[in-house]
Each structure stands twice: as structure tokens, then as C-alpha cells.
Amino acid sequence: MAVDTQTVEKLAELARIAISTETIEEVSTRLGDVLQLVDQLQAVSTEGVAPMAHPLDEEQVLRADEVSEPNRREEFLQLAPQSEEGLYLVPKVID
Amino acid sequence: MHQLTIAEIIRGLRDKQFSSVEITRHLLDRIQQLDGNYNSFITVTEELALAQATAADERLARGEAPPLCGVPIAHKDIFCTSGVRTSCGSKMLDNFVPPYDATVVENFNRAGAVTLGKTNMDEFAMGSSNETSYYGPVKNPWDTDCVPGGSSGGSAAAVAAQLAPGTTATDTGGSIRQPAALTNTTGLKPTYGRVSRWGMIAFASSLDQAGPIARNAEDAAYMLSVMAGHDAKDSTSLNRPLQDYTLNLNDSIAGLKIGVPKEYFGEGLNADTAARVQDALQEFEKLGAELVEVSLPHTGLAVPAYYVIAPAEASANLSRFDGVRYGHRCEDPQDLRDLYMRSRGEGFGDEVQRRILVGTYALSAGYYDAYYNKAQQVRRLIKQDFVQAFDKVDVIMGPTSPSPAFALGAKSADPVAMYLEDIYTIATNLAGLPGMSLPCGLVNNMPVGLQIIGNYLDEARMLNVAHQYQQVTDWHQQYAGSASAA
């Protein structure tokens, strides 16, 4: 199954990954190869089969909504490329 | 000293034949001298290792003896290590120094282990050859023109080259077992949820599982006993009692029923690899085991289902790398969209980008049912194959990978050819079952792995079975020529 470059551009936009115009053909071809591989799934009948979420069918664990970890805001902010006064900095969003 | 197993190191330290500082120093020197040939480490933590070894020697002198006190190991660079750069093999995290330890790392620290460093890996654990690492490929110590397998290629090569007696690793579709097979080491992927995923950088959350790579089953048992256990910080971790996996190693395996799936011996399997695996099965018959043919009819669908589920989960997991909170940020972003697009375009390598795009496709409006939902249904069919087989047998055996290690570059241009490397390992991740690989022979002086698949939470039996085989064979004691020469 071929994937056209327009589809790749749309996916790249959705995934927020910049893809250069020089490589887009190559990316389209490779994506097509992978989608051709996974299209083998369409040949098998799965009527009435429940999708599997957890191998041991364990249920989602719930816990009380209580503070369990110390506040390490400063340490985590230090990892950010840019921060100021306890906040993450990004380019201006609103004009 | 570098030839000692973990069991021998534990005894040697207790009997005061050598100190932890001595063996740690020896291995650090060896890494410095030899790892230029293999590139199995991304970061060597010399200072930390010597401090931990000194502390371990003091504890040993006081008669305190946590299980791995003073034993040097290395962690795959996917596990967060407090104060030590954790790159996940990616430019995206080249500057990332986590402020906390992963639960697996914490468990080894509590057990007294010494951290030699962080091992190389495919970027975000996506690969079967260790060629997608931002830090360059790992070379197979058995032949440095060949790949060591992946994604835990550095963890496997470090053990094979005798730079560390054991390493941690992770397996989403075969990333512990396939590199173990290609480097003549013993690797075990536990039941999904047996080992905590907290602090282990996520690839595909419903498939990821951590386990050990070591020289033999006994050492893997020592490591797994420390790694496994419930963790409240990982909501998918199984709340089951802790186990000492070393206790049953010496049990007899007479009467063991071994399932041999005919689908694992079909087209695509290298004839010499098949012959070595058949030799191993005969060895098990001599030990009193019985071979039973079983069928896993949905085997052929495992790779297609995996390449929907794993990329879909990866595309969600990797959305956290946004250039805002940590990791790579592009220069001079024009606006927020540009910041996201270029930070991710620059920070992720080709294979990671490809998988994010495939996952985005599979999860996008109009395709969800046809891809993700369908793959999750097929996943249940694959699990049911195993459940039916385990009604009749105790363990399942077959090849780990279709052929021995291939040359660097041989498959890197063709993702689908690379994906088929994991044709025999992926199904166990989809089913959540434990699997292991152990050395079972050589083809043209390159290692072949035997895969053992166990029932849910049956790791102790698998290790027992593997250990019994290693009592009557010496494939696991063959070492890479290029490593033992030094």
C-alpha cells in the first residue's frame, strides 16, 4: 500500500515532527512498506473477539487521591531548556 | 577476574578472596581498554562505581550481606539513574540527567550492587540491531563486523565481552532475547508486570518489560530475584509475592513436557540455526523431558499486530518530548508550533520518527478500528494459542531468532526485513508471557539462541530448565574470541 506525500505531511503535522522536503519521498516509501506489512491483519476474522488490554486481564488499580511524593519543583524545572520564576517558558502564544 | 560469574563473585566477596573495589577497578579498566572496540557503554560511572564498591566492602566487613553486595553490574540507558545522564540512545535526551532512580535501579542499589555505567541501545529501544543509537552502533564481540542485536545490544555485548557479569535490559518485542541469542548470553524477559516499569523510559507500555542479561541461568536468577516485585508506582505491576528464583535451579526436569511449535520451524529459519535448536531439544530428552508437537496457528500475525500496537503506544508515549520540560529544544523557535516541530524533528532519529508516524496513522480518525482495535483482537487470538498449548505442556521451546548475527548495515535500509528479526519473540510480548534465550551452539563460530517460553509467572521453572541444560552443556561458557584474547 502506497502512502502519498500529502498523507505523510498530514501525519507529520499531527505528530508535530518537522520532516524535510528532501526526505519526504523516502519516508513515504518506508511508511508504505510498514502499512503493507500490517495490512495482513485485515485477512483474519476477529468477529466476536474482545480486544485485549492486559495479558492477565488485571483491572486498573485505584488509589486515594493523596499527596505521596515530595514537591521537587525546582529540581524538575532545572531540566527545562528555559524557565523563569517557577514556570516553563515557551515562545509567545497570544499576540 | 572478569570471567567470574555473579554466583562466583558473591562467594569470592564473602570468602574475602577479593574486594568489591578490586573487581570493580578491574572491570572499569577493562571497559576503558576494550570498549572502544564494541561501543557497548554510553556512560561509564567510574566515580559512582568506586564509591558504591567502597561502601559495599564496608558492609561486607561488618557481615551485612544484601544479596548482590559488591557485585558490579551495568544498566541499560533506558533506566533513570539519579544524577547520571539517561539518554535512551537518543539525541532528544542527550542532556537529560534525571533527579530520581528507576525502581529497578533502586532495587539493585538496595541489594548492594555496584553500577559500572549505562549501556548503549537502539534509540528509545526501537531496533533489532543497535544501529539506531545516537551514540553509534554496538559491535558484536564475536565478530565486530556484525550487529549484537537490539535493542539491548550494549547490555548483551558488555556481558559477552566480559566487561560486566550481568546487565539490566528491556524487551518490548524481543529486545532482551534476540541480542542474548546473537551474543551467546542468557537473557530473560519476565511475565508482563513482574518487574516495575517506573523510571524506565516508556516505548510501548502494554508490552515493555525489564529483565536481566547474564552469562548463565543461575546469574539471571540472582538478578531477577532483585528486580522483580510489586511497585505501587507502576499501576500495571503485578501484586504477587516475591520469589527467590535461585531456589529451584537444581530440581530434576525428568518428566518435563516441552512443546515444540511447528510454526517456529518453517520457512525463513536458517537451516543451521534449526539444527542447533534440534540438538538442544535432544539434550533435553536425555535429561528426561518429553517433546510434544504443539501448534500456535496465529504466529504469522504477531509481527503485523505488533507493528500497529507498539507504534501506536509509542506515538502516545513519545508525545511527552516537546522541547518544553526537558530534552532537546531547537534554536530560535519562531512560535510554539515551530518549537514542537523542529525540536522533535531534530531530536528523534529516522526509525523513531517512522514509528511515531505509523502510530499516528493507526490512531487517527477513521483508522482506529481497522488498525488498533483489530490488532488488539488479534492479540487475544495469539494469547489463546499459547493458553491452549500450555494446557498440554510445561514450557515451549524453539529458536530465538531466525539466523545468527548479520553484518552491520545489512538490514538498516529495510525496516520490514529488520522487523522480521523478531518473528519468534514478538508473540510472547503480545501475550504477556515470559521468555528467555540461552546459548545452544555455534554456526560458523557465531552464537545461536534457544528460546524457552514459559507460562504466566513461571520464571522459576524456566530458570530451572535452563540451568539443568547448562549443567550438561558448555555453550554458555564459550566466549567471544576477540574478548578473551585481551
Image (cartoon, rainbow, N blue to C red):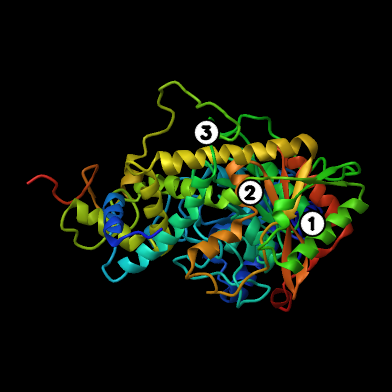
Dot 2 falls on which chain?
Answer: B
Name the N-terminal-most of marks 2 and 1. 1
Q: Residue furthest top?
A: A64
| Residue pointed to by mark 2 | B299
What amino acid is labelled 1 in the image?
Answer: Glu
Residue under the point 57% across and 28% down: A58
Can residue B133 be seen here? The reply is: yes
Is mark 3 in CB contact (under 8 Å) with mark 2? no
Label for residue B8? Answer: 1
Q: Residues within 10 Å of mark 3 (few under 14, many from 20)?
A: few
| Residue pointed to by mark 3 | A47
Judged from the image, the secondary structure of the residue bearing numbered disc 1 is helix
Dot 1 falls on which chain?
Answer: B
**Nearest-to-viewer mark from 1 and 3:** 3
Residue under the point 15% across and 58% down: B334
- Say if labels 3 and 2 share a chain: no
Q: Is residue B343 above or below residue B486?
A: above
Q: In x, y percent, where is residue B103?
A: 55, 42
Viewer-closest of B358 and B437: B358
Residue under the point 60% across and 38% down: B381
What amino acid is labelled 2 in the image?
Answer: Thr
Q: Is B174 on the left or on the right of B416, as rendered?
A: right
Image label count:
3
Judged from the image, the secondary structure of the residue bearing numbered disc 2 is helix
What amino acid is labelled 3 in the image?
Answer: Glu
Q: Is residue B197 above or below residue B476?
A: above
